[in-house]
Image (cartoon, grey):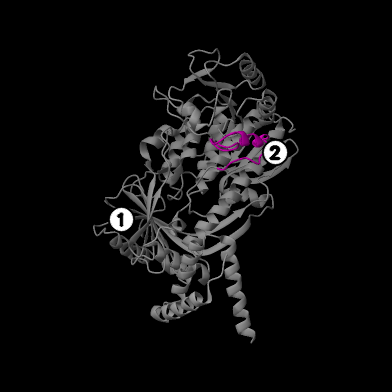
């Protein structure tokens, strides 16, 4: 899987931030879960999806211990 | 439970028969040893007795109660079970009374998100599913039991002690007429989820319990909707809990609703609360006319089974061996398959037509089926009753996306009961031959059916023993005819079905496949042979018949040693 050009990735980052705000505090968890399912489906690759889940989970530990 | 003022058997639609205890020969000194004792006259025990009777084997069937089940529990009969009922000669009243169906709908917050459509291949004789109250299931089976000279049905007779010997069992039976001992060569334990025999043998079910609890309520109402399975996720009539609705005969409807987390079971089961919840659910589906409450109970999902379904001469069948979640309707249906599986094997062993090694295959085959059920049922149960916040959130995300998108909708599929494929069984020794086929039913699976021009069906011609389906150009070659002859010598119950164009071959049922439809269904070409077991599972299939392997498979199905 090829990574996004940095410029596009930055746009993705900004779009996500805006969308989380649009969803609102009460619905942000549901929104993010839906987003993950949609992305997982569009990715069409269970190995890549598992890897993405792992990467995102590992990041949480860093947050706790820092 | 039933409404206040009603007795436990006071039903809106069903007249419970009362069965008297009989004075049996053992009370007057008879000591004859019986071939088979079956404990528990529920649907599974009665079916086992009828399977044995089909082979001419006598059985004594005991039950501690004096009537049929006090409420309707299992209500869905799957197509393979209809074939079992047909083979034991009991299917006619089921076809007449039960409501057949093949569709379902799932809703999320009131909007339909999934359309269940169970396949109905054109050659099949029965629909994928039939709804019928358990009392009727038991009544129809009991009518067949009562009509059989080979089944000694003893009501109000409780197993109160059990001794196991090398060559049989000795049971102590208590009845209002007195207590007695009864000896039998084999014991079938069909004594239900709380099986006393299991306890007597010091055995325990192992597995998992799930948190979610469902109330199941039967009501009578005049409600216009086809026989379909309806599932409601997040309905306004039962916030925080899933609802299932099934139609049954006699204007009876099954309403299952999930209790909310932390909700008191005792409170939930009070009549006024049942009435309030059901009313709210009915308003949700547009039913505002009066309705009557028939019966209710509570249920939580379990996946529990014994490590081994056989203990010497004791065989556990049905709920006594395994408890499965209701989602996917596998409890009754798998129990019936247990009864048929042990029934034909035990009958052939008792007749001396098969070596008792054949009985060793019962537990691996049926426990394998249970574990397969667990794998599917665990998925449906997690969807129907999400166990943690993670599962709840993922389900909400998937369901809410389903409103506008196709891709998550399959998650709401109830994964209805499918018959198990015995591809790993010792009785399926040449499953490797599947590789030569481009399709068709695999080794170990249940044979598909095909409609014939005269209105009959292919499987109508299967026998009580092994059945070969041979595909040929016009008529069997000399070599093929010899193979069929050999099979007839190995198994005296052997039946041959020849699919070809000639209209006569001695000793075989000839099926003319005018448009090649049957050959397509079985992915067969001239020279292909399918060997079916008495339960119509495929013991082996050969794209081009290999006589030595076919004969070996037949021998193994009759208890012969595996290669």
Residue situated in front as seen by the camera: B81 or A4 = A4
Q: Is residue B307 left or right of residue B394?
A: right
Quadrant occupied by the C terminus of chain B: top right
Q: Name the residue under label 1.
A: B292
Q: Is residue A65 above or below residue B137?
A: below
Magenta span: chief secondary structure? loop
- Please count the marks in the image: 2
Q: Is residue B402 left or right of residue B47?
A: left
Tag 1, which chain? B
Residue at left offset 56%, top offset 50%: B373
Q: Do the residues labelled 2 and 1 touch (CB within 8 Å)?
A: no
| Residue B406, quarter of picture | bottom left
Q: What element carries label 2?
A: helix
**Mark drawn on residue B130:** none
Badge 1 density bin: few <14, some 14–19, many ≥20, Cα 10 Å: some
Q: Mark 2 points at which residue?
A: B360
Sequence-wise, the earlier of marks 2 and 1 is 1
**Is there any visible trace of residue B237 in the rendered image?**
yes
Q: Could you tell me residue B137's position as x and y percent? A: 44, 41
Residue at left offset 54%, top offset 62%: B210
Q: What stretch is highlighted in magenta?
A: B420-446
Q: Is residue B403 magenta?
A: no
Q: Could you tell me residue B30's position as x and y percent? A: 64, 30
Q: Is mark 1 on a helix, strand or loop?
A: strand
Tag 2, which chain? B
Q: Does the magenta stretch include residue B435?
A: yes
Quadrant occupied by the N terminus of chain B: bottom left
Q: Could you tell me residue B544's position as x and y percent? A: 62, 26
The residues tagged by marks 2 and 1 sit, at their Cα atoms, a distance apart of 49 Å
């Amino acid at each position: 899987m090829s990574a996004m050009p940095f410029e596009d990735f930055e746009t993705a980052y900004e779009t996500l931030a805006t969308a989380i705000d649009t969803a609102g505090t009460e619905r942000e968890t549901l929104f993010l879960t839906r987003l993950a399912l949609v992305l997982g489906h569009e990715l069409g690759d269970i190995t890549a999806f598992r890897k993405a889940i792992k990467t995102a989970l590992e990041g949480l530990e860093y947050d706790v211990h820092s | 439970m039933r409404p206040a003022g009603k007795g436990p058997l006071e039903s809106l639609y069903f007249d419970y028969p009362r069965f008297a205890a009989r004075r049996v020969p053992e009370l007057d000194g008879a000591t004859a040893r019986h071939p088979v004792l079956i404990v528990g006259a529920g649907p599974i025990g009665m079916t086992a007795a009828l399977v044995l009777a089909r082979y001419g084997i006598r059985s004594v069937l005991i039950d501690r109660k004096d009537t049929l089940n006090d409420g309707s529990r299992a209500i869905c009969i799957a197509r393979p079970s209809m074939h079992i009922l047909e083979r034991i000669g009991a299917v006619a009243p089921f076809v007449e009374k039960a409501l057949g169906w093949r569709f379902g709908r799932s809703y999320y917050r009131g909007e339909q998100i999934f359309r269940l459509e169970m396949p109905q291949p054109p050659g099949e004789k029965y629909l994928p599913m039939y709804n019928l109250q358990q009392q009727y299931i038991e009544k129809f089976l009991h009518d067949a039991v009562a009509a059989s000279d080979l089944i000694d049905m003893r009501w109000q007779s409780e197993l109160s002690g059990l001794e196991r010997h090398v060559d049989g069992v000795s049971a102590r039976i208590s009845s209002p007429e007195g207590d007695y001992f009864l000896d039998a060569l084999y014991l079938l334990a069909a004594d239900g989820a709380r099986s006393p025999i299991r306890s007597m043998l010091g055995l325990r079910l192992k597995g998992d319990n799930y948190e979610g609890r469902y109330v199941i309520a039967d009501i009578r109402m005049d409600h216009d909707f086809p026989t379909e399975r309806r599932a409601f996720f997040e309905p306004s009539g039962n916030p925080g809990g899933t609802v299932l609705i099934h139609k049954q005969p006699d204007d009876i409807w099954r309403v299952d609703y999930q209790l909310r987390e932390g909700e008191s079971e005792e409170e939930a089961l009070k009549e006024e609360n049942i009435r309030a919840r059901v009313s709210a659910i009915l308003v949700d589906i547009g039913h505002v006319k009066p309705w009557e409450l028939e019966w209710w109970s509570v249920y939580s999902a379990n996946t529990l089974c014994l490590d081994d379904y056989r203990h010497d001469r004791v065989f556990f069948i049905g709920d006594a061996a395994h408890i499965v979640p209701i989602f996917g309707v596998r409890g009754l249906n798998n129990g019936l398959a247990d009864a048929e599986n042990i029934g034909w094997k035990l009958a052939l062993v008792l007749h001396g037509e098969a070596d008792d090694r054949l009985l060793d295959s019962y537990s691996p085959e049926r426990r394998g089926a249970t574990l397969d059920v667990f794998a599917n049922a665990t998925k449906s149960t997690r969807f129907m009753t999400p166990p943690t916040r993670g599962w709840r959130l993922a389900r909400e995300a998937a369901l809410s996306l389903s409103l506008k998108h196709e891709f998550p909708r399959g998650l709401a599929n109830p994964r209805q009961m499918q018959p198990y494929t015995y591809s790993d069984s010792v009785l399926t020794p040449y499953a490797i031959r599947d590789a030569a086929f481009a399709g068709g039913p695999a080794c170990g699976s249940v044979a598909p059916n095909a409609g014939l021009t005269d209105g009959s069906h292919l499987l109508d011609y299967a026998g009580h023993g092994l059945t070969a389906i041979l595909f040929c150009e016009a008529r069997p070659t000399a070599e093929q005819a010899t193979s069929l002859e050999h099979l007839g010598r190995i198994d005296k119950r052997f039946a041959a079905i020849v699919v070809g164009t000639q209209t006569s071959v001695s000793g075989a049922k000839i099926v003319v496949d005018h448009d090649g439809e049957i050959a397509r269904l079985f992915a067969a070409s001239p020279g292909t042979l399918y060997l079916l077991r008495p339960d119509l599972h495929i013991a082996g299939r050969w794209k081009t018949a290999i006589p030595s392997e076919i004969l070996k498979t037949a021998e193994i199905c009759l208890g012969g040693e595996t290669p």
